[in-house]
Image (tube, rainbow, N blue to C red):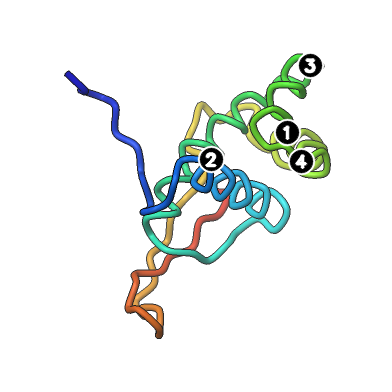
Amino acid sequence: MRHGKHKYKLSVKPSHRKSMIRNLASDIIAHGQIKTTVAKCKAVKPFIERLVTIARTDTVANRRLAFKKLDSAKAVKKLFADVAPKYTERPGGYTRITKLADRRVGDGSEMSYISFV
């Protein structure tokens, strides 16, 4: 049985999905918030939450884990220096998804912002 095995597929191949989620997470760390589709926001939220949880304790092993997941030295540096220290006392829920009323012009897809709390 596949109970608890839910994954957002996003209509792309697994390698593309993995790189897309990495890039979205790097952009969220770099800019603080990004505007994208609701499905992509929901897909990247658990990924970024785990990264912030890892980054709350600054050790070499945790930096290597974060680099393995993000594959961007600049994003890892900013994650450990700027983002994670804000959430040391917070038990979880580091991001929020804010849905927008208007849809994308081209295909009518629901849009939203994902940002740090």
Could you tell me how far apart the alpha carbons at marks 3 and 2 are, in whole angstroms?
A: 20 Å
Instruction: Calculate the distance from the C-alpha at mark 1 to the C-alpha at mark 3.
Output: 13 Å
Question: Residue type at mark 1?
Answer: Pro
Query: What residue is disc 3 on?
Result: 59
Cβ–Cβ under 8 Å for marks 1 and 4: no
Determine which residue is flagged by label 1. Answer: 85
Asked which secondary structure carries label 4, the reply is loop
- Choose mark 3 or mark 2, whichever is in front: 3
Determine the residue positioned at 63% across, 34% down: 87
Residue 77 sits in which quadrant? top right
Labels 1 & 3 near each other (Cβ < 8 A): no
- Between 114 and 89, which is closer to the camera in this rendering? 114
* Type of amino acid at the residue the image marks with label 2: Tyr
Residue 2 in the image, given as x and y percentages of width and height: 21, 23
Q: CA distance from mark 4 to mark 2?
A: 20 Å
Q: Amino acid at mark 4?
A: Ser
Q: In the structure shown, which secondary structural element does the residue marked by tag 3 occupy?
A: loop
Q: Earlier in the sequence, mark 1 or mark 4?
A: 4
Q: Give yes or no for contact between labels 3 and 2 (Cβ–Cβ under 8 Å).
A: no
Query: Decide: marks 4, 3 in contact (CB < 8 A)?
Result: no
Viewer-nearest of discs 4 and 3: 4
Q: Which residue is mark 2?
A: 94
Q: Looking at the picture, does residue 110 appear above or below residue 47?
A: below
- Asked if 17 appears above or below 88 in the picture, the reply is below
Q: Residue furthest left?
A: 1
Task: Specify few, some or many for label 1: CA neighbours under 10 Å numbering under 14, 14-19, or 20 or more.
Answer: some
How far across and down, in percent of the image, does residue 100 sit?
Answer: 39, 72
